[in-house]
Image: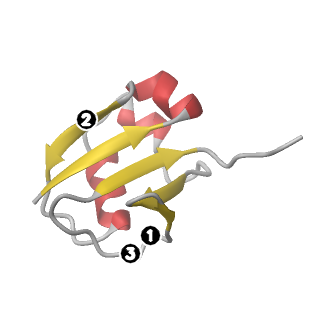
């Protein structure tokens, strides 16, 4: 399936604005692991030990959320206000 990926804040600084990819990943967790497996800089920016939030079609979701063809996935660090 083809999905659009967007990166924000420090993740965007490391990886750029985003990309469209073909993936067989069934969930957000599997997609994150697929991107980490690409190696640097994805491995550092999306590492499992880092706090990274994810949105699927502009709705915050946990990693078990299923992907679908044409979905938009966003990765970003936790956001604080002030």
Dot placed on the residue nearer the N-terminal end, 2 or 1: 2
Please give the name of the residue rendered at 18% of the width and 58% of the height, measured from the top-left corner.
70
Dot placed on the residue nearer the N-terminal end, 3 or 2: 2
Q: SS of the residue at dot 1?
A: loop
Image quadrant in which the C terminus is located: top right
Q: Position of residue 27 (x, y in %)?
A: 30, 70
Instruction: Give residue 72's mark.
Output: none
Please give the name of the residue rendered at 56% of the width and 51% of the height, measured from the top-left corner.
52
Between the residue at mark 2 and the residue at mark 1, the CA separation in whole angstroms equals 20 Å
Q: Could you tell whether 22 is left or right of 72 in the image?
A: left
Residue 27 sits above or below residue 43 on the image: below
Between the residue at mark 3 and the residue at mark 1, the CA separation in whole angstroms equals 5 Å
Residue bearing mark 3: 65
Please give the name of the residue rendered at 37% of the width and 36% of the height, measured from the top-left corner.
42
Residue bearing mark 1: 63
Please give the name of the residue rendered at 39% of the width and 24% of the height, measured from the top-left corner.
16
Of labels 2 and 1, the one closer to you: 2
Residue 1 sits above or below residue 37 on the image: below
Q: Position of residue 59 (x, y in %)?
A: 49, 64
Q: 5 or 49, which lies in front? A: 5
Q: Position of residue 17 (x, y in %)?
A: 38, 28
Q: 45 or 73, which lies in front? A: 73
Q: Dot 3, crowdedness within 10 Å: few (<14), some or many (≥20)?
A: some
Instruction: Give residue 19's mark.
Output: 2
Q: SS of the residue at dot 3?
A: loop
Q: Dot 1, crowdedness within 10 Å: few (<14), some or many (≥20)?
A: some
* Snapshot quadrant of residue 67: bottom left
Between the residue at mark 3 and the residue at mark 2, the CA separation in whole angstroms equals 20 Å
Q: Dot 2, crowdedness within 10 Å: few (<14), some or many (≥20)?
A: few
* Residues at discs 3 and 1 in contact (Cβ within 8 Å): yes
């Amino acid at each position: 399936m083809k999905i659009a990926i967007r990166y924000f804040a420090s993740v965007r600084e490391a990886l750029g604005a985003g990309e469209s990819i073909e993936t067989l990943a069934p969930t957000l967790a599997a997609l994150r692991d697929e991107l980490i497996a690409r190696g640097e800089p994805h491995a550092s920016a999306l590492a499992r030990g880092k706090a990274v939030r994810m949105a699927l079609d502009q709705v915050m979701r946990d990693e078990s959320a299923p992907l679908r063809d044409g979905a938009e996935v966003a990765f970003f660090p936790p956001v604080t206000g002030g």
